[in-house]
Image: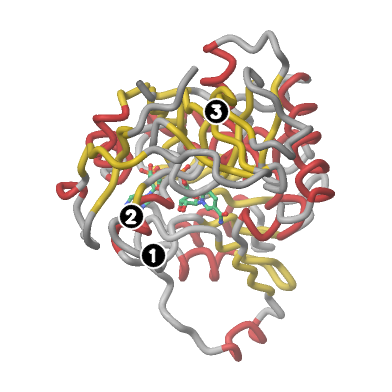
């Protein structure tokens, strides 16, 4: 399939708190220029909260900024030196600028997963939906705090994209999950995913956690909410416990005094998936765990809605507005 000269992408030309400035624009398509290049025609891309951080300027980027961090599609061109990939291969990957019709990677890129030849369009959609959030949900309870059987674990935004898989995976490790979400409907989703205790975000979380754990506190709080949840997380964790901060959905956690950790000998970690799966060994290890967990039905993803690429602004508006549960996916023309 020839690569068209121009392609449709979703981009913002300047930082903005609201999704209003997001454009469905036309830019030049990438072409093979180096011997190790691979060009992928994207078919589906996963929507993630991180795209909003780049748009808002919470994470540094250059503008115009093309959105997207993961996609699945078909290889349509390869450079002369490429031997591991051929035209027609189906792949899923994690990389920037994935909300585009075409993506250039190289055969040196670590974060690509080759999919079986018979992967259908539905299969591509599933991989675009699960890759980034699934790996996040698997690496955190292994690397950031190694969850043990019987641990009380607090999970914020438990009905969200990462939250659902994190609840499933952490429960499967034998943890007693205390799920937090903003509505009863969302909490019922967390229950289906294995959460044992359900707390509404507007409750007195530390008091409820103290009741559930008989004053011991949780071993770890997996906190993706950030600014609004930090203090409640801190208070809910027991002596020698761990605060796993992995997102800023409500804003960035303000600076705090290191000395506060000494009040309970706490640990705080701030993890980014990209830094957990940088080497080929790390990528292979965690994608294998992901595949096993999927095939053993330990985890799964629920697609909330599939939007056309041209409607990314609506998709992120729904996500940032706390209207969604599970995963949002874009279909790329
Ligand atoms: P979600 O589907 O979880 O959506 C975000 C959820 O956060 C909302 O549904 C909402 O759940 C909750 N929330 C609480 N306060 C706010 C607020 N003020 N504004 C918006 N949402 C709020 O998104 P994702 O699954 O894509 O991502 C979840 C989190 O994980 C994000 O913070 C993201 O940045 C982080 N992440 C981190 C990674 C890493 O490598 N560290 C990788 C991937 C994701 P409720 O209504 O129930 O409170």
Vertically, is 128 above or below 241?
A: above
Alpha carbons under labels 2 and 1: distance apart:
7 Å
Q: Earlier in the sequence, mark 3 or mark 2?
A: 2
Q: Residue at x 69, y 36 (%)?
A: 80
Badge 3 element: strand
Classify residue 81 as left or right of residue 70: right
Vertically, is 125 above or below 31?
A: above
- Residue that badge 3 annotates: 72
Residue labelled 2 has its Cβ within 8 Å of some atom of ligand 1: no
- The foreground one among 153 and 157 is 157
Badge 1 element: loop
Total numbered labels = 3
Task: Kindly indicate whether the residue at mark 1 contacts the one at mark 3 (C-beta within 8 angstroms).
Answer: no
- The foreground one among 178 and 75 is 75
Percent coordinates x, y for residue 159 in the rendering? 47, 36
Task: Kindly indicate whether the residue at mark 1 contacts the one at mark 2 (C-beta within 8 angstroms).
Answer: yes
Alpha carbons under labels 3 and 1: distance apart:
23 Å
Q: Judge whether residue 305 can be spotted in this image.
A: no
Tell me the quarter of the picture where residue 105 sits: top right
Badge 2 element: strand
Q: Earlier in the sequence, mark 3 or mark 1?
A: 1
In the image, which disc is placed on residue 61?
1
Classify residue 175 as left or right of residue 17: right
In the image, which disc is placed on residue 65?
2
Alpha carbons under labels 3 and 2: distance apart:
20 Å
């Amino acid at each position: 399939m020839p690569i068209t000269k121009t392609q449709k992408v979703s981009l913002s030309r300047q930082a903005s708190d609201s999704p209003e400035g997001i454009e469905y624009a036309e830019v030049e398509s990438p072409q093979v220029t180096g011997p190790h290049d691979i060009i992928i025609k994207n078919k589906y891309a996963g929507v993630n909260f991180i795209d909003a951080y780049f748009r808002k300027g919470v994470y540094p980027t250059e503008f115009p900024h093309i959105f997207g961090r993961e996609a699945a599609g078909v290889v349509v061109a390869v450079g002369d030196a490429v031997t591991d990939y051929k035209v027609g291969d189906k792949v899923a990957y994690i990389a920037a600028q994935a909300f585009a019709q075409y993506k250039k990677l190289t055969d040196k890129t670590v974060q690509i997963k080759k999919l079986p030849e018979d992967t259908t369009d539905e299969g591509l959609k599933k991989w675009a939906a699960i890759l980034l959030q699934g790996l996040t949900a698997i690496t955190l309870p292994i690397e950031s705090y190694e969850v043990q059987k019987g641990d009380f674990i607090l999970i914020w935004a438990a009905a969200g994209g990462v939250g659902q898989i994190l609840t499933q995976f952490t429960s499967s490790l034998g943890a007693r999950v205390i799920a937090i979400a903003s509505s009863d409907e969302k909490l019922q989703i967390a229950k289906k995913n294995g959460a044992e205790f359900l707390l509404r975000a507007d409750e007195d979380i530390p008091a409820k956690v103290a009741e559930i754990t008989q004053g011991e506190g949780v071993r770890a709080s997996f906190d993706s909410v950030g600014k609004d949840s930090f203090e409640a997380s801190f208070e809910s964790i027991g002596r020698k416990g761990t605060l796993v901060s992995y997102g800023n959905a409500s804003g960035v956690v303000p600076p705090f005094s290191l000395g506060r950790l000494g009040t309970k000998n706490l640990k705080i970690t701030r993890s980014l998936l990209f830094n957990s799966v940088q080497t080929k060994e790390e990528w292979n290890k965690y994608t294998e765990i992901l595949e096993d967990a999927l095939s053993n039905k330990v985890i799964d993803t629920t697609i909330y809605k599939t939007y056309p690429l041209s409607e990314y602004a609506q998709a992120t508006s729904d996500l940032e507005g706390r209207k969604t549960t599970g995963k949002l996916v874009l279909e790329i023309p």
